[in-house]
Image (tube, rainbow, N blue to C red):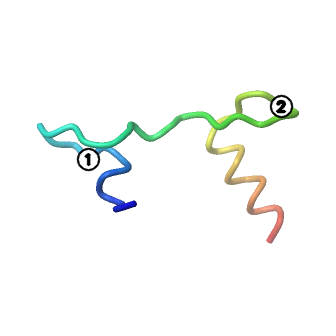
Amino acid sequence: MVQSSYYRRPSSNKKGIKPSEFTFNKSKGYVSQDAVIKSIELLT
C-alpha cells in the first residue's frame, strides 16, 4: 500500500484514514500511543 494513501494529510483533499489515538491491547483494553511507545522502549 502506498504510504500517502494510508494516513490523512492536512489538505482539502481528505485521503486515507485518520491516525489513531489509542491502540487495543488484549489484556489492558485501549491504551494511549504513549504507553505503546514506552512498552517498546522497555524492550530495547
> Quick check: 25 left or right of 18?
right
> Quick check: 43 left or right of 36?
right
Hey, what amino acid is under mark 1? Arg
User: Which of these two is toward me, 14 or 42?
Assistant: 14
The residue located at (30%, 52%) in the rendering is: 5
Q: Give the farthest residue toward the bottom.
A: 44
Q: Which mark is residue 9?
A: 1
Q: In the rendered structure, which disc, 1 or 2, sits on the residue that comes first in sequence? A: 1
Q: Quadrant of residue 43?
A: bottom right
- Asked which secondary structure carries label 2, the reply is loop
Task: Identify residue for label 2.
Answer: 28
The residue located at (80%, 71%) in the rendering is: 44
- Asked which secondary structure carries label 1, the reply is loop
The residue located at (65%, 37%) in the rendering is: 23
Residue 28 % position (x, y) = 83, 31
Q: Give the farthest residue toward the right.
A: 27
Q: Quadrant of residue 42?
A: bottom right
Q: Give the farthest residue toward the front.
A: 1
The residue located at (38%, 39%) in the rendering is: 17
Residue 19 % position (x, y) = 44, 41
